[in-house]
Amino acid sequence: HGGNHLSPFIPMYDTDWKDVDVVKFNLYNVSFFLAQNLVLYPIDLVKTRMQVFPDLSSAHATLTPQHHHSSKFKSITNFLSECKGMRQEFKGVMKSRGVSGLFRGFWWFTIPTCAAEAIYYTTYNITKQPFLHTEIEHKPPPQIAHSLVPFFAAFVAEVAVTPINIPVDNVTQRMMIMPPQPKDSGIHIVRDIMQKEGFRGFFRGTGIHVLTYGTASMFWFGSYELSKQVLFSMVSSQGSSPSSATPHIVHGVSGGIAGVVSSIISNPLDVIKTRVQVAGTPGCSVMGVSPHPHTIDHYAFPLSALPQTLRKLYREEGLRGFGRGVVPRMITSVPQSALTLVLYELALSWSTL
């Protein structure tokens, strides 16, 4: 661990990456990821379905004319509508597929994502380390520049796992939204993508994927490190010796803040990404994204097409279209973010050489 004093650049209780057994760290971290994913995957499945099928939430919206209400009332109404739509979709999936329906695509998602987890956190720390250790040479970087390091390192880490995550995303999201039919297993979906779209089909939506998850990753780790620094500064300013639980509380609260920030900022892009990736899937009629190949290149999704797609989504669904699935996303992302980062810090501290 770092020293007991509070450094303005490396918060106390941080584990130095140079002292970490990388293999042991990744074994701990991947084990934690598996346990979390088992609990939270069904909610992510419902979020995906709500983003693709707007009627899942809009069908449960209050039909009272909106112009009679304040914007605050509209926000509450929309939130309750999303909650009701989420509950109804859980019931619908259970009725049509049973409990197993809530875990469609689970192993197709989990197994390759375990490898991505190891690559992501290792890349993040390797990228971040040289910048942070300028302080050890008594040449502390400017505070603003230092604060941007986690944002940059997190974006680099996300790019590093893109070759794994995009194909996994494309297969599992189609499994999540397809209606029950004889040939709806992961193997059949993989074969269908290969036959209809070729190898490129697995990389549908690459541009919007990198933008969405790169943004989410930047603000997740960036806001986490900043929140952690602020909270540790508050603890240090109190003067009394912190308890052994203090680091875990700080990590958990900072992780929750990071989950909120990342979800709110990246949800509109996540809606577009999901619809681009599943457009043209059997049984799926996607609003806001045309499945015609000459309208939008689904494989690369050039970012120049993003403004056009955002405008189309706004015309067809209004501002609510950008918030599709935000309730189930917040329900999963905030506690998951808090727990993930507490366990991440534990894995680091338990893996010191």
Image (cartoon, rainbow, N blue to C red):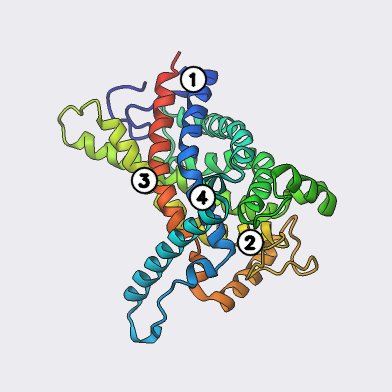
Secondary structure at numbered mark 3: helix
- At a point 63% along the width and 51% down the height, the residue shown is 173
Specify which label sits upstream in the sequence, 4 or 3.
Answer: 4
Measure the C-alpha gap from mark 1 to mark 2.
42 Å
In the picture of the structure, the residue carrying the numbered disc 3 is: 256
Closer mark to the observer between disc 3 and disc 1: 3
- At a point 59% along the width and 62% down the height, the residue shown is 52
In the displayed structure, 291 sits above or below 225; it is below
Amino acid at pointer 4: Asp
Q: Residues within 10 Å of mark 4 (few under 14, many from 20)?
A: many
Q: Is residue 255 left or right of residue 105?
A: left
Closer mark to the observer between disc 1 and disc 4: 4
In the picture of the structure, the residue carrying the numbered disc 2 is: 275
In the picture of the structure, the residue carrying the numbered disc 4 is: 44
Q: Is residue 270 left or right of residue 71?
A: right
Measure the C-alpha gap from mark 1 to mark 4.
35 Å
